[in-house]
Image: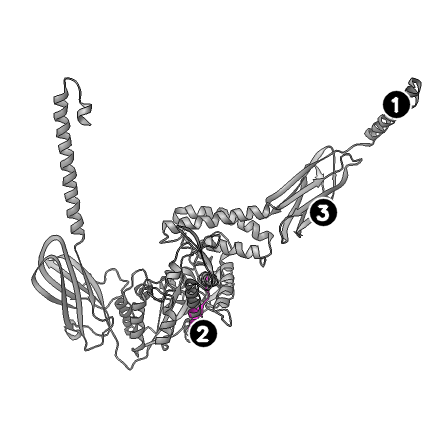
Amino acid sequence: MINHLLRGKQRPVFQQAAFLLLALVTALIISGQSGYLTRAQAAEAGLTVSTDKFLYHVGDTATFNIALNAGSRQLSGDLVLKVYPAASPASANATTGEPLTTLKIKRNYSLSGQDSVNFSAALSKLGVKPGGYPVRVSLEANGREQLGATCWLAVAPGSGGQPLDLVLIWTVSAPPGQNPSGEFEDSSLLDRCRTTPRSPDTLLQHQDVQKKYPQVKTTYAIEPELLDELAAMAGGFNARTAGGVKPYPANSAEATAAAGCLASLRQVASGGSEMLAAPYTYTNLTLLAKNGWDDGSGQFRVGDNALTSRLQLTQVPKGAYAPGLDVTTDSLRYLAATGHEYTVLPGSFRAAVESSPGLAGAASYRVRDIGGERITALFASDDASAALLGGKTDVAAFFASLANVYNNGGPLVIAASTVPNPAISEQQRDQVYDIISHEPWLNTMTLADAVKKYPPSTEPATLLKYIDPVSGYVSQTYYKKLEAAHESFEDYRAAVDPDEAAMIELTRKMFIAENDYWAGQGAQPQDTNRGFPYLDNIVSTVQTEFGRLSIGITLPWLQGSAGGEAQIAVHNGNHYPISADIVVEGNNIKFPQGADRRLTLPPGETDLEVPYHGSGWSRIKASIQSRGHVLADDSATIHPVSGRVWIMIAVAAAGLLAGGLYYFLAVRRRRS
């Protein structure tokens, strides 16, 4: 191409310049690629460390499993282990102070490529007592750390003391799998119901854990929508695949697996575990409250119905779970006003409650909002919750936090998930429950048990926490569309009985559309895109249902006074009643019996008569409205005629009549 472009007498000069430029660019590209490979290989360098046990006892020997990778470099120095004073796993500076103990694992250690080292030491040599200790393993040269990593060393307290009360709150949920048409678009929920092979987050684990460790009490917050989806699958369902829609009848293996999952969760509910009420979908309640929507209360009401019916509970749960444990002054009413008695808040929320004098450190508080709604709140341990049920599970850090709380005299630890599905696998959970079941210093209880044992002992405290004004769904994109769809939904909800099947289905779709999987932290692009069809479906459904409404107004063509009666015909083409405002208006028109009427329109036609008074020619407009939004309208013109005009019309009519008679009786007779 270069030779093709280089033409004329200056061709050799241009060729040389072009080839020099091409060589330079090539050299830069090769150099850049080489530099990239070097950086990439260097980025692979690292060190990880773990212990052979999650929890040790005094007198044990701890083994540290160390994996090293020098990447493309050649490293050398001393491999050092440092044990630091007991600290919270949530602490950002746990390894910045003076260590309790420093041990050199290897001197003058040379590392090229990858290597693994196992190092064992008695706890007495490490200088630790019961508690949770951060341990730093590093490769150091001339006092500078080249590679390093931290793990947690948890040492159990001795026997004989008062046990530490422990509440484990587990969330069970899943992203919505159905589209607005009711078809399942992925197999993620079914994958969690498989018996072989079992997925790491199998739904069957909850019944298995309960049977294997009956002495370990657990509290569950199960997303009600997940139960509805399992029930839908169990009854036979359609799945959308790359090849089209595939039906799975009720006797299919897939439907049977879903039924088995639902049955296992029923067994958990009847086996002594506490169930918490939850919103129908794990939506962001704080953002609903910020907009003044009462959907949060509706989410809990619908969620309670789904939870009690699907799990066959004898009563609605008294405790409530807010997704993410996020509760603000505005959203507190969702939990309290729906009849729930207690909830759990993050430990970081203490400052938002203990701002009043005399409040500090209590296990529970009676918390209220500005409107006076009240609920009992207990506080989760942020470090224990994050270590066990956060985005990255660290079981050793979890037991380290428990040991520290025990040593500090804390009577209660609540570990609650702030994420919809804890990252902990079934295997890890089995290990955790096995340890808890053998430790006499740990006493598990439900959240209901904790409320009874640690009731509020202070006057009600106002929760002073508000949402960040800049918070929103996925850069506001999804939220703006949600807000627009919500307006249509509210118009429909104001017009239709809440028990009407069409209203129930639309409400369910609205609640699914509000799901935080599509709109909150960690939302995946494909999930967000899947949320938009729900919003489109809601708007389309409302338009279709309201499109079956029509109104017509009829006025006398000529009237002899300034008043009359407007004949209004309203037609409801739906198979269910619609409650709406019939609004009649006109310029310089008065309506003695009122212009607006709130009516419940049965299917078919409804006729109305509206008296009016006015002056001069004008138009009267009649409309069907919901929340001030016009659903259908029509108008007609008033033609008032005075007495003088009526005389003129009568004279003209008489003249026409006389002329007609004269024509027929005289003129035609004369012609004939």
- Residue at 13% over, 33% down: 23
Residue 659: give its label: 1
Residue 270: give its label: 2
**What percent of the width, then of the height, locates residue 12?**
12, 22
Which of the 4 quarters of the picture holds residue 430? bottom left
Magenta residues span: 264-279
Reading the chain from its start, which is encountered first: label 1 or label 3?
A: 3
Amino acid type of the residue that numbered disc 3 sits on in the rendered structure: Asp
Instruction: Please tell me whether mark 2 sits on a helix, a strand or a loop.
Output: helix
* Left or right of residue 84, residue 108 in this image: left
What residue did someone put label 3 on?
607
Single out the residue that lies furthest toward the bottom.
160
Reading the chain from its start, which is encountered first: label 3 or label 2?
A: 2
Give the alpha-carbon distance from disc 3 to disc 2, as whole Å: 55 Å
Whether residue 272 appears in magenta in the rendering, the answer is yes
- Residue at 72% over, 47% down: 607
Which of the 4 quarters of the picture holds residue 342? bottom left
Whether residue 230 appears in magenta in the rendering, the answer is no
Reading the chain from its start, which is encountered first: label 1 or label 2?
A: 2
Amino acid type of the residue that numbered disc 2 sits on in the rendered structure: Ser
Residue 407 in view of the camera: yes
Amino acid type of the residue that numbered disc 1 sits on in the rendered structure: Gly
* Left or right of residue 326, residue 8 in this image: left
